[in-house]
Image: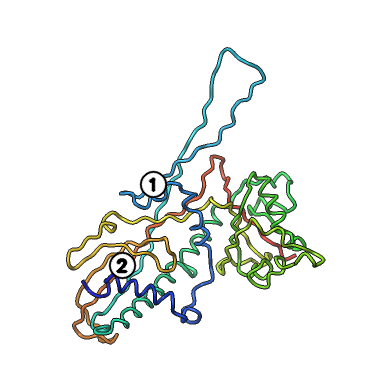
Amino acid sequence: MANSRAATVLQDARAFIQESNNKKFELRPEMTKLLSGFMRDREFTIPNLSKIKTAEKRATHAMYKTAKAFTIGTEKNCSLSGETSGSSSVELTWAQRTFTIVVSEKMYQNNEIGMVQGLADDLLAAEKSLFLGASGVDAILLAYLEANKTQVNALSGGGGHNTWNAALNQVEVANADIDRFYNYLLSEMALNNYDGEMLDFVNTMWGAEWGEGRGWFLNQGESNSTNTAFQFENVDVKMSNLIVPSGYNRHVHYIVPTGDVAFLDWTTPLNRKGMSTGKEEWGTAESLLVPGLTFDTYTTYGCADTTDNGGSKQDLVTNIEFTLNYAIAKQPFSVANESSIYKYVNLIA
């Protein structure tokens, strides 16, 4: 087996990435935390997640119970006709994202540390390209939130403090009400029968007002004339540079009750088993940037001219393909166009 695929080298590469300070500058990742929100509660969102991850075939649907309004009578009856609740299923759509890393054996010959560093650099750059940026997984998740926002909202009947824009399927918040944003939001989610903690996927500059920047609203103490910190207890904020407000919006939020959305991954039985032909290998590897996600790996060995990269005319090269099999899931609803993803925007004026 070539050194580039040795388990110890891969582990050393992981350690190198975690310790490298270079990530702060040239290698700094995109500031976006959308995937962490989709990963947070996925074991609770999809109770049989462990079975899905290790199934012989990719799961194509998930079962769920449907709501049922039972008929309520006003007196006893001798002739009975009972009712029962129902169930349905939601389809899981799977997709793949891949990248391939090449390692030159002679370029790193007698220089194990060099191979570790080179592999670490390549893995970090490849996973950044996979997960982050304008075409990364986080961008896919943002598009998913926008495409699956609810078109059904109790505020359409005039309830709540803010305004429901039915044409854009979003709740609009006047600029004057921004300091009570979560206070009104949590009450309006209660009007839609949601209680407990909420995820807030929001543009990064919200942090200047919420808490990760100057934190104006969060740090208005009890001794100040206005205390606005009371409203933040049941909100988990996930900021992203990928969320960009439009010309009339100051901030854009996608509010999701915790336990609603999930990012699923799956590995093929062949890769889990680990097979080799001598020139080809199938295996798995855990993501470096997103622990908990597992790649299929396919490795080939061959001869190539690597003189342009410090190798030789006749070099042994190792190509490693990493494949992420993934699906995005959310809690299903039997009511048409209903979702538990609510879009809120803070208006500029």
Q: Nearer the viewer, residue 130 or 261?
A: 261
Q: Is residue 30 left or right of residue 189?
A: left
* Residue 232 percent coordinates (x, y): 67, 59
Residue 64 picture location, percent across and down: 48, 40
Using the image, determine if residue 129 lies above or below residue 86.
below
Q: Position of residue 321 (x, y in %)?
A: 31, 67
Q: Is residue 68 above or below residue 78?
A: below
Helix, strand or loop for disc 1: loop
Q: Which residue position holds label 1?
A: 60
Question: Along the horizontal axis of the image, is 312 left or right of 46?
Answer: left
- Residue shown at 74% from the left, 59% from the top: 180
Which sits in the foreground, 27 or 22?
22
Residue at horizontal 41 percent and vertical 70 percent from the top = 127
The amino acid pointed to by label 1 is Thr
What residue does disc 2 label?
Answer: 321
Name the residue located 34 percent from the left edge and 76 percent from the top edge. Answer: 119
Q: Residues within 10 Å of mark 1 (few under 14, many from 20)?
A: few
Q: Secondary structure at mark 2?
A: strand
Colour mode?
rainbow
Q: Position of residue 90 (x, y in %)?
A: 46, 44
Position of the N terminus, as image quadrant, is: bottom left
Judge from the rendering whether residue 216 lies leftward or rightward of residue 31; answer left or right: right
Alpha carbons under labels 2 and 1: distance apart? 25 Å
Q: Is residue 171 above or below residue 338?
A: below
